Amino acid sequence: MSPKRHIGLVSLLVRDYDEAIAWYRDKLDFVLKEDTLLGGGKRWVVLSTGRGEAAACLLLARASGAEQLPAVGNQCGGRVFLFLNTDDFDRDHAAFSAKGVHFEEPPRLEAYGKVAVFRDIYGNRWDLIGPAASTG
């Protein structure tokens, strides 16, 4: 029997914990799962795409030092870094747009579904992806 494995967290460099929490919570409807003080100004901050067991989680990591600070907003060298799947593309695209999320392009249909690229508070590029059937 194969072991059950999954990626538990993806670390995302941020400038400030509180501004990042507010943006992901208020703009993308993420859920704050944990915010624990670690000492020395560090915190263990986990945000989730939802409340279910299959929800993906981000660990917010406050950048420090000359190596980390320039990577905030450019963790993937300008490429799309994260992929936010949704069961209803049109609903989420409209809701995010109404909340001020900047989409770089109009939605387009690809073989894998309906997609549009947006940027987060720091400039990281994300794909919002919905099933091809959600084309309206």
Image: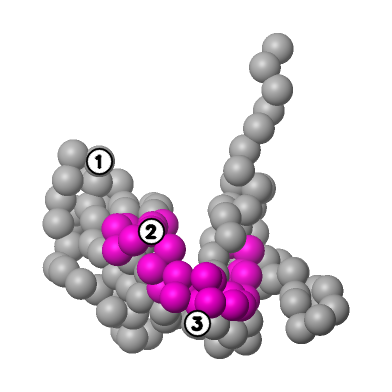
Q: Say above or below: 43 vs 100.
A: above
Three-letter code, disc 1: Tyr
Instruction: Determine whether, in the image, residue 28 is placed left or right of residue 30.
Output: left
Q: Which residue is mark 2?
A: 76
Q: How far from the left and from the top, in percent, is residue 107?
A: 17, 62
Residue 105 vs residue 43, the one in the foreground = 43
Percent across and percent down for residue 111 are 18, 39
In the image: residue 101, left or right of residue 52: left
Label whose residue precedes the other's in the sequence (2 or 3) = 3
Residue extent of the magenta highlight: 58-82
Q: Amino acid at mark 3?
A: Trp
Q: Is residue 35 visible?
A: no
Taking the image as shown, residue 124 lies to the left or right of residue 68, namely left
Q: Residue at x 85, y 79 (%)?
A: 39
- What separation in Å lies between label 2 and label 3 (alpha carbons)? 20 Å
**Regarding mark 2 in the picture, which secondary structure is present there?**
loop
Helix, strand or loop for disc 3 = helix
Residue 67 located within the stretch drawn in magenta? yes
Residue receiving disc 3: 23
Cβ atoms under marks 2 and 1 closer than 8 Å? no
Residue at x 70%, y 12% (from the top left corner): 1
What is the C-alpha distance between the residues marked 3 and 1? 28 Å
Q: Position of residue 54 (x, y in %)?
A: 60, 46
* Residue at screen point 33% across, 86% down: 100
| Dot in front, 2 or 3 | 2
Is any atom of residue 67 visible in this view?
yes
The answer to whether 116 appears left or right of 54 in the picture is left
In the rendered image, which residue does mark 1 sit on? Answer: 112
Q: Residues within 10 Å of mark 2 (few under 14, many from 20)?
A: few
- Marks 2 and 3 close (CB-CB < 8 Å): no
Q: Earlier in the sequence, mark 3 or mark 1?
A: 3
Q: Callout 2, which amino acid? A: Cys
